Image: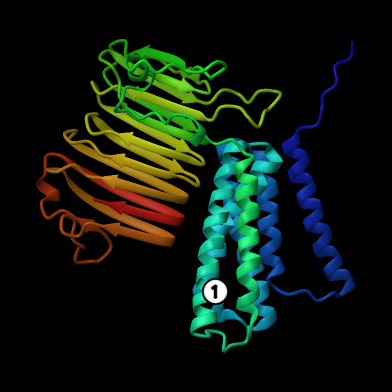
Amino acid sequence: MTRTTSPRRGGLVIGLALIILGAAALVVQVSGISIGWPAWVILPGIALILGALAVGGSGGSGMAAVGGIVTMVGVVLAVQEAYDLYATWAYAWALVAPGGVGLGLTVYGLLARRGDDLRGGLGALLVGLVIFLVGFLFFEGVIGLSGRRFGNLTEVVVPLAIIGIGVVVLVGAFVPGPWHGPRTTFRDGGEQARAERGETAGPGAPVPEQLAVPLEGAPDAEVMVTFGAGHLRLGPAAAGMLVDGSYLGGVRVERAGPGRIRLAPPAPPAAWAWDRAPYGWTMGVSAEVPLRLRVESGAADAELDLARLRLVELRLRTGASETRVTLPAAAGSTRVDAEGGAAAIRFRVPDGVAARIRSSITLGSTDVDTARFPRTPAGDAWESPDFARAVNRVEIEVRGGVGSVAVR
């Protein structure tokens, strides 16, 4: 029997995207058609969203979010260019972020059949529309930012915007979300604590996969966590364990020797279902040996309680997510390298721990407690006065595109 191979979806998507972009450019050049320059911003944005389908998984989520931002920037610029409305950036930014992020994730979630990304995208799109509506009514309806050029349009925009928001909410109502079920936290002990309280899962409810990997006497540890969309809770593991915990949605384990492990979601099933359970991991990592931890997440809500860990290094990569990190209280010197897409990252530095913070966010904000961590004389960082001589200290470096960072 001759074995045949089917074409890879990734290659098809990228190939078609390149053909379409190239054909469009060729038509423009040969025909002499004049198009506005914002189109050359919109087309790469669309290509990024299509390319996200080829990447897939959490990486695709981040790529789709960037593509949505680029596409929305082009759309806003096209309208502003056509009608000379550049002053509208005072409120139109909401359409770019979080609106553009929501657009990219919504399209990606629909095309890739990823319910978690679709839910997150609809939420971000809704927030962007609401912020834009409020800004439009204030800047145009109250103070006339564009010189009253909109006339009575503000009276029409309100009902249209309400209809649009209603459509988004209505679509979201048909997409099952993680808020429909109980939300676990690391502090309550997850499934065990609920069982002790007499709470049982209903018929047909998904059962989390249990995992316990021993430390096996390793002198140090390296743990990599690759997590897509859902809820992630991480804290200290039980004595003698490298990792443990419960993993709703399943987990794939890759070991590279004592103290070396990678955890990732299982391969997607052949028949994807909209009503599948969202990922929800409540896990622990060793607090007994020096640890290097890497966490990569997509559209996730993550809480990392590292206070009791002997953490040497944390490498954090996030997509369209919210991540809260409690840093070690007595680990000596810890280095944190964080990079976010359209993300909110919150760090808590325990009392008695010194810190040095550097942040470079392209479009967003950095909020640092300057009472504890004043600006350095050079103005390029925030640093505890006793950082150089502190026994326990953390060095935080954050990079990102669109988002916010807070250090307290």
Q: Is residue 88 visible?
A: yes
> How was the colour assigned to the protein in this rendering?
rainbow
Residue drawn at x 53%, y 26% is: 265
Q: Is residue 397 left or right of residue 353?
A: right
x, y percent for residue 401: 47, 56
In the rendered image, the vertical position of residue 186 relative to residue 131, given as above or below:
above
Left-right relation of 169 to 386: right
**Residue at horizontal 60 percent and vertical 65 percent from the top:** 73
- Residue 326 x %, y %: 27, 39
* Quadrant location, the N terminus: top right
Position of 57 relative to 172 (above/below): above
Residue 349 point in image, percent of width and height: 22, 44
Residue receiving disc 1: 136
Where is residue 272 drawn, in percent x and y?
68, 28
Q: Residue at x 85, y 21 (%)?
A: 4
Q: Nearer the viewer, residue 296 or 114?
A: 114
User: In which quarter of the view is residue 323 placed?
Assistant: top left
